[in-house]
Image (cartoon, rainbow, N blue to C red):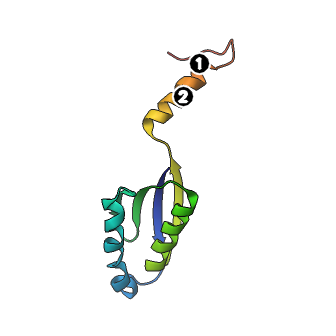
Amino acid sequence: MLFLIVSHPRPERPSAWAKDRTKAWPWFEPLLADGTCKCVYARTGRGAVAILDVDSHERLHELLNGWSELIPCKLDVYPLIDIAQSKQFLDEQLRSAPPGRKKKP
């Protein structure tokens, strides 16, 4: 299951958390190496975004808590769907459209 995670650190001085923020990148390294984290980027200003690929909600919960332990923040979580799966879903939706409803080419 793919998830886009967007972090919003607490509104404190960035310098107050600089030492802890440096721990985030080493924390992500094994997740990047094993494919759990597809990518991670620092956001302009403060915060980060990452795409996580996990096999359960429990694993996602574990990772989100680990992230928050390093840097207290609000985490927005967006479930994602692979583009091929999305196309398949849309194709099936078009095939099962009610009669009389115009299908776009």
Residue in front for this viewpoint, 97 or 37: 37
Above-or-below relation of 3 to 105: below
- Name the side, left or right, on which 4 lies relative to 20: right
Residue hosting label 1 = 95
Residues packed near mark 2 inside 10 Å, few (<14), some (14 to 19) or many (20 plus): few
- Name the side, left or right, on which 99 lies relative to 8: right
Residues packed near mark 1 inside 10 Å, few (<14), some (14 to 19) or many (20 plus): few
Above-or-below relation of 81 to 34: above
Q: Position of residue 56 (x, y in %)?
A: 54, 56
Q: Which amino acid does label 2 sit on?
A: Leu
**Secondary structure under the numbered disc 1 in the rendered image:** helix
Q: Which amino acid does label 1 sit on?
A: Arg
In the image, farthest residue toward the bottom: 16
**Secondary structure under the numbered disc 2 in the rendered image:** helix
Q: Where is residue 55 in the image (x, y as percent from the top left)?
A: 50, 53
- Name the side, left or right, on which 81 lies relative to 101: left
Going 52% across and 62% down the picture, which residue do you hit? 59
Going 50% across and 28% down the picture, which residue do you hit? 88
In terms of image quadrants, where is residue 96?
top right
Residue 33 shows in the view? yes
Q: Position of residue 73 (x, y in %)?
A: 50, 74
Residue 9 shows in the view? no
Q: Do the residues labelled 2 and 1 touch (CB within 8 Å)?
A: no
Q: Residue 5 carries which label?
A: none
Residue hosting label 2 = 90
Residue in front for this viewpoint, 24 or 13: 24
| C-alpha span from label 2 to label 1 | 9 Å
Residue in front for this viewpoint, 96 or 32: 32
Name which of mark 2 and mark 1 comes first in the sequence.
Answer: 2
